[in-house]
Each structure stands twice: as C-alpha cells, then as structure tokens.
C-alpha cells in the first residue's frame, strides 16, 4: 500500500492576481494552470521542475487572513544563501510587507525572514533548515558541539562569556550613546570583551559585513567572535546575556509570546526617532 504523500496546499484568497504576482516574484513559482470554476478562478503554482512534487493552489473568493500576534502559521521556502534572505527582506521592507526581519536562530530554524502576502498569509524564507541549502553545515556544527563532551557546563558558560563581541551602534544618536554608556557601566569588570563600533561614516565596512547602511540605522547589530552577525532583538538578547543584571530580561525578551510584539514596538520607536532627527532612510 502506497503511503499518503503531501501534494498541495490550497488557499482561498481575496485578491487572486495580487497573490499570483507575489508568489511569482518572491518565491519564483511558475503558473502551471489557471481555470475558471463557476464564478471564481483556480490557479496552480509550482516551482520550476517540481510540478510533479508539490503545487500551491489559490482559489478566488476568500477573505483576507487576519494573523494575530502569537500566530506563527506560515508557508516556508528555502533559499540558497544568507545573502538571499537579506535581499528578500530588504525588498519586502521597501514594499512594507516585511513582518519578521532577517535573524539567526539555533538549528534547525536557521537564518530566516518573514513576509506577508496580499491575502495576509505569512511566508518564510530561510537558509540552513534541514530541508534546504546550508543544512549540512549546520548539522556538522551541531555534531561538533556534541562531540565536545570533555568541556563541562561551567567551562562552556565561561567560554561563552569570555567571547569578544563587537557592537555596531549609531554614534550620531544621543540615545544610543547613553545606552552604550549604560552597558559599559554594567560591564566594568569585563568591558574588554565588548567592543563598541560607531557606524557613522562606515558604510563600506558595513557592506563588507553584509549589513546595509539603512538597516544598520534601523537595527542594532553585533558580531560574534566567529563572525556570526545578529541583528534587531537577537542582538540585544546576546548583549544582555553577557550582563549578569540583564540576563533575566534577556530571557523574558526571548519568549515566543513577547518577542514578536516587542520587535514591532522596537521598529516603530526607532522609525520615530530617526524621523524626528531627519535621518529616516527612504
């Protein structure tokens, strides 16, 4: 007996043509069938050369899907690199449809961003998840970590705390400077482990790191000792974890229920601050 196989997902949508254009543009899906059925239309979309594996079916006549803050339902697409995730996020941000800025999570989540399609459905683009490119490297890294059984938990904790990190902050922002000074006071005993780098006039350096100057203004970025870049709330969480007094706050911010809401507030506040200063990137 042949076991069941997932062949398609069907979505009722309000704006059929807009949804088709979205999935063609961002997901590079191909239109393989379009037919009228009674007073509506049905569209089949598929990835190139995967028409026999899986199709996305869009049915005209639905209502816009209203996502709530703690609803992470989404369609997931794997891309070839972190740079591609960043490019998609940047394009979506310019169009006002970015809901999850690009960020790195522990394996198997990987590096990802999230968009909202014209019907309100969330769509994720990721690199490093088990079913997509980059998974092999993540699995090797995970296995390598498991193999270090001789290092005690206390030694691992000490090693992580001793890691140097570079914080890329906006030195032209008085509030950002006050925040830096506050962190420096809290890290007097090991402040040499945190390097503060002013991004003012450092566009070339930022681009070499894969950070666009406009994104550097909108989000805090930190670079780990191994070259890994964290941004937005992920950067704050990593920074706070290195400050004993702020570790409980880092734990709270990282909670799945809290983090999406706080991220939205964070982006709104930053945009207002930049707008007041006449520095909001276009």
Image (spheres, rainbow, N blue to C red):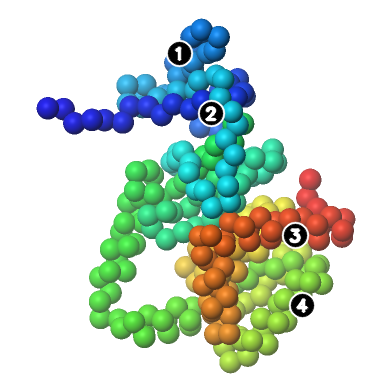
Q: CA distance from mark 4 to mark 1?
A: 58 Å
Residue located at (49% from left, 15% from top):
42
Q: Which of pointers 4 and 1 lies earlier in the amino acid sequence?
A: 1
Residue toward you, 268 or 139: 268
Q: Is residue 239 visible?
A: yes
Local packing at callout 1 (Cα closer than 10 Å; few below 14, some 14-19, many 20+) is few
Residue located at (57% from left, 68% from top):
253
**Residue where numbered disc 3 is placed:** 270
The answer to whether mark 3 and mark 2 are in CB contact below 8 A is no
Quadrant in which the C terminus appears: top right
Q: CA distance from mark 3 to mark 2?
A: 30 Å
Say if 189 sits above or below 68 in the image: below
Q: Which of pointers 2 and 4 lies earlier in the amino acid sequence?
A: 2
SS class, disc 1: strand
Q: CA distance from mark 2 to mark 4?
A: 44 Å
Q: x, y (%) of residue 33?
A: 45, 13
Q: Which of pointers 1 and 3 lies earlier in the amino acid sequence?
A: 1
Horizontal side of 281 relative to 122 (left or right) equals right
Q: CA distance from mark 4 to mark 3?
A: 15 Å
Q: CA distance from mark 1 to mark 3?
A: 44 Å
**Residue where numbered disc 2 is placed:** 23
Residue located at (58% from left, 51% from top):
69
Disc sitting over residue 41 in the figure:
none
Q: x, y (%) of residue 160?
A: 45, 78
**Residue where numbered disc 4 is placed:** 178
Local packing at callout 4 (Cα closer than 10 Å; few below 14, some 14-19, many 20+) is few
The answer to whether mark 4 and mark 3 are in CB contact below 8 A is no
**Residue where numbered disc 1 is placed:** 33
């Amino acid at each position: 007996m042949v076991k069941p196989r997932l062949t398609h997902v069907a979505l009722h949508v309000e704006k059929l043509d807009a949804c088709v254009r979205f999935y063609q543009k961002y997901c590079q899906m191909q239109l393989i069938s379009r037919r009228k059925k009674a007073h509506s239309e049905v569209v089949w979309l598929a990835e190139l050369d995967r028409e026999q594996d899986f199709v996305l079916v869009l049915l005209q006549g639905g209502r816009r899907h209203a996502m709530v803050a703690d609803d992470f339902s989404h369609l997931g697409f794997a891309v070839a690199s972190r740079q591609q995730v960043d490019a998609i996020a940047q394009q979506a941000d310019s169009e006002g449809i970015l809901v999850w800025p690009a960020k790195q999570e522990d394996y198997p989540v990987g590096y990802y961003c999230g968009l909202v399609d014209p019907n309100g459905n969330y769509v994720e683009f990721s690199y490093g998840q088990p079913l997509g490119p980059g998974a092999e490297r993540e699995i090797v890294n995970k296995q390598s970590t498991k193999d270090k059984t001789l290092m005690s938990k206390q030694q691992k904790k000490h090693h992580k705390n001793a890691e140097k990190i570079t914080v890329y902050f906006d030195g032209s922002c008085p509030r950002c400077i006050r925040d830096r000074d506050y962190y420096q006071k809290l890290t007097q005993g090991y402040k040499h482990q945190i390097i503060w780098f002013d991004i003012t006039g450092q566009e070339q350096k930022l681009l070499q790191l894969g950070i666009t100057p406009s994104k550097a203004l909108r989000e805090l970025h930190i670079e780990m000792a191994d070259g890994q870049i964290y941004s937005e709330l992920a950067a704050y969480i990593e920074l706070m974890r290195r400050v004993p007094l702020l570790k409980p706050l880092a734990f709270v911010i990282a909670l799945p229920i809290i983090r999406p809401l706080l991220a939205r507030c964070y982006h709104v506040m930053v945009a207002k601050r930049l707008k007041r200063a006449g520095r909001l990137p276009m």
